[in-house]
Image (cartoon, rainbow, N blue to C red):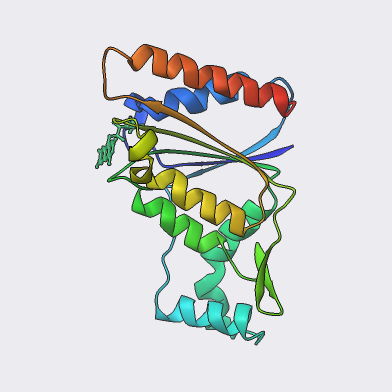
């Protein structure tokens, strides 16, 4: 299986979320072809006038790009191709300000290309990634349950994006790191959930 790790862990070796990612990787029971995108070391390119113009021209207009446009959009295409070739994506990130850290959204904007991961059929969007599996591993200081779940925009936004791409097999593993009294149980539970995912997907 081709596994793509996409991580944004700016706390480095002290990262709480890294513990979840390492647990996942250490407990895989079969051999996989693993590729990693580290968004701290290699931040994705964001749209500017040239790249956005090229994207619109090619992906929505069906018009061939000139060499300057092709070159400008290449970094986004490299990420898009890498994403499309993955059977399983592991996305690891901390919650920042109730949502995805901005650079992760920039990554999603790079890979979510029309005609590649979704298309329009008579004006209706159709997801093209229905064979992909996707797991988000994330931590936050708080725990957003019940009436407060609307504050967890990591989950809300990713669900929308994953559904839009037609991904059916996706899951979220979360641990809350902010309360020292529950820290250990939070991470134990999250690791158990990882074990269950590995087992049920025969990874
Ligand atoms: C810039 C910044 C913003 C944060 N925003 C939130 C937040 O909105 N909600 C929350 O519960 N925790 C927030 N936190 C806490 C982190 O999500 C939490 O400590 C997490 O476990 C950090 O993961 P890491 O150790 O992998 O970096 C924030 C931390 C930082 C540094």
Residue 43 at least partly seen: no
Q: Is residue 190 above or below residue 151?
A: above
Tell me the residue at 59%/67% (across/down): 113
Q: Nearer the viewer, residue 187 or 146?
A: 146
> Can you tell me which quadrant of the image ligand 1 is in?
top left
What is the quadrant of the N terminus in the image? Answer: top right
Q: Nearer the viewer, residue 120 or 76?
A: 120
Numbered marks: total: 0
Q: Position of residue 106 (x, y in %)?
A: 42, 59
Q: Nearer the viewer, residue 123 or 117?
A: 123
Tell me the residue at 57%/57% (across/down): 79
Q: Is residue 68 above or below residue 34?
A: below
User: Does residue 76 appear left or right of residue 149 in this picture?
Assistant: right
Q: Is residue 51 above or below residue 167?
A: below
Q: Position of residue 190 (x, y in %)?
A: 49, 22
Quarter occupied by residue 13: top left
Tell me the residue at 62%/70% (across/down): 114
In this view, the residue farthest toward the front is 147
Residue 74 at least partly seen: yes
Q: Nearer the viewer, residue 17 or 4?
A: 17
Tell me the residue at 75%/48% (across/down): 131
What is the quadrant of the C terminus in the image? Answer: top right
Quarter occupied by residue 174: top left
Q: Position of residue 156 (x, y in %)?
A: 45, 48
């Amino acid at each position: 299986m081709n596994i793509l790790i996409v991580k944004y862990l700016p706390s480095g070796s002290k990262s709480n979320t890294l513990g979840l990612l390492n647990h996942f990787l250490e407990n895989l029971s079969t051999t996989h072809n693993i590729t990693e995108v580290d968004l701290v070391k290699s931040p994705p390119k964001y749209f500017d006038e040239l790249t956005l113009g090229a994207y619109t021209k090619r992906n929505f207009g069906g018009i061939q790009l000139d060499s300057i446009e092709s070159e400008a959009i290449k970094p986004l295409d490299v990420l898009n191709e890498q994403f499309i070739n993955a059977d399983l994506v592991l996305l690891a990130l901390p919650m920042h300000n109730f949502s995805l850290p901005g650079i992760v959204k920039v990554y999603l904007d790079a890979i979510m290309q029309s005609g590649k991961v979704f298309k329009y059929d008579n004006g209706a969007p159709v997801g093209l990634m229905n064979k992909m599996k996707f797991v988000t591993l994330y931590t936050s200081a708080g725990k957003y349950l019940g009436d407060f779940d609307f504050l967890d925009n990591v989950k809300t936004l990713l669900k929308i994006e994953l559904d839009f791409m037609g991904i059916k097999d996706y899951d979220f593993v979360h641990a809350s790191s902010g309360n020292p009294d529950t820290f250990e149980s939070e991470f134990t539970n999250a690791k158990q959930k990882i074990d269950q995912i590995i087992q049920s997907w025969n990874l």
